Image: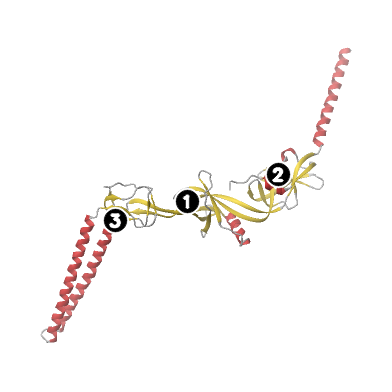
Amino acid sequence: MKRVAWIETLIVTTFLAACNANSHVTTEETSDQSLPVTELILKDTTLHHEYVTDIQAVQNVEIRARVPGFLEDIYVDEGQQVKKGQPLFRINAEEYKAQEAKANANLESAIAEAKATELEVDRVRILVDKDIISQSELEVAKAKNQAARARIEEARSAASNAAIRLSYTYIRAPFDGLIDRIPLKVGSLIEEGTLLTTVSDISSIYAYFNVSEREYLEYTKSRLEDRVNSSNVVNLVLADGTRYPYEGKVETMEGEFEASTGSIAFRAHFPNPEQMLKHGATGKVRLTNKIKDALIVPQKAVFEIQDKNYVFVVDSTNTVRMQSFSPASRFSYFYIVNSGLKPGDRVVYEGVQSIRDGAVIKPEFVVMDSLLASAPRTAF
């Protein structure tokens, strides 16, 4: 009997303890949580988009041989700065000098022949005037003179061509620039069209980057809406993550979108006084768009369910309700709302993981401007 009584006492004690524990849990679950809440406002906002860019010199020209021959002299070195007209290479010119001399000799011969036919015309004309020979003889003499004059022009053209080919053996810089790699050495046998080097003008550079159609429209509209303060200024992030010290400007864009990617190419122009940037370098262009009266929601307030974005909206009774919304863009630690929310909506700023739809909370209001002011700044 004592054993049975002891077991009954143990069961009752265990039941009461369980009830007390359940009562404690229920009390914790039903008690109001204190959570930070912020009110959505409209704010003029600056968006920054970064794009991988292809950096190119304003001029980048391949220097190729225009006549075949042996490379006799190289006057410059790789990486050297050159001026327009400065000698770069010389191809052996003996063959072309001989061709020029022969062409000049043929020209002199043609001139002498033409002179002789002119004298013949004058002689025949005198005889025709004296009725010694017929008029047809004069016409023949004139035809010979015209043929001789035509040979002069032909010989002059050949001499000019020979002089030009001779000039091609002496290769000069087409503009101020920087010499690239020189693949050949003195004594190399080269053919017409052989690549000798490349000259790049990098006093300033072009940065090409592709922009999606949506971001292109965003960029264009922001400038149409604010013609006075709109700017085409862009910044450049170098491959090591540092900011290029000079600002550039968007100069132009292509006339059509690329069908395969749905993007359009922009071209920005950057000064390059220290020649830090080289042709073919890479980096990222940062494009800035200004948006007026953007509805902003903090990233911490947003959670995703099946690829949809949600926030907890707090009503007048401090009850939270899940609300989906569509973001237009994202910047720093905030979203710009496209649809689904409106100015004045109160949303839970932090702690969205600890509450569920329909819960009642104790809001602790946080001003949106203070959140914007305390948000981490970007590198530039």
Q: Residue at x 63, y 53 (%)?
A: 46
Task: Measure the alpha-carbon separation of dots 3 and 2.
Answer: 71 Å
Task: Measure the alpha-carbon separation of dots 2 and 1.
Answer: 39 Å
From what the image shows, is residue 306 above or below residue 124? above
Image location (x, y in percent) of residue 345: 75, 50
Task: Find the residue positioned furthest to the front.
Answer: 274
Left or right? Give the position of 184 relative to 155: right
Secondary structure, mark 3, is strand
Q: Dot 1 corresponds to which residue? A: 55
Around disc 2, counting alpha carbons within 10 Å, would you say few (fewer than 14), some (14 to 19), or many (20 or more)? many
Image location (x, y in percent) of residue 189: 27, 49
Q: Dot 2 corresponds to which residue? A: 301
Around disc 1, counting alpha carbons within 10 Å, would you say few (fewer than 14), some (14 to 19), or many (20 or more)? many
From what the image shows, is residue 231 above or below residue 309? below
Q: Nearer the viewer, mark 1 or mark 3?
A: 3
Rendering quarter of residue 171: bottom left
Q: Nearer the viewer, residue 374 or 333?
A: 374
Q: Residue at x 69, y 48 (%)?
A: 297
Secondary structure, mark 1, is strand
Image location (x, y in percent) of residue 223: 60, 60
From what the image shows, is residue 10 above or below residue 78? above
Q: Nearer the viewer, mark 3 or mark 2?
A: 3
Left or right? Give the position of 96 relative to 3: left
Q: Dot 3 corresponds to which residue? A: 170
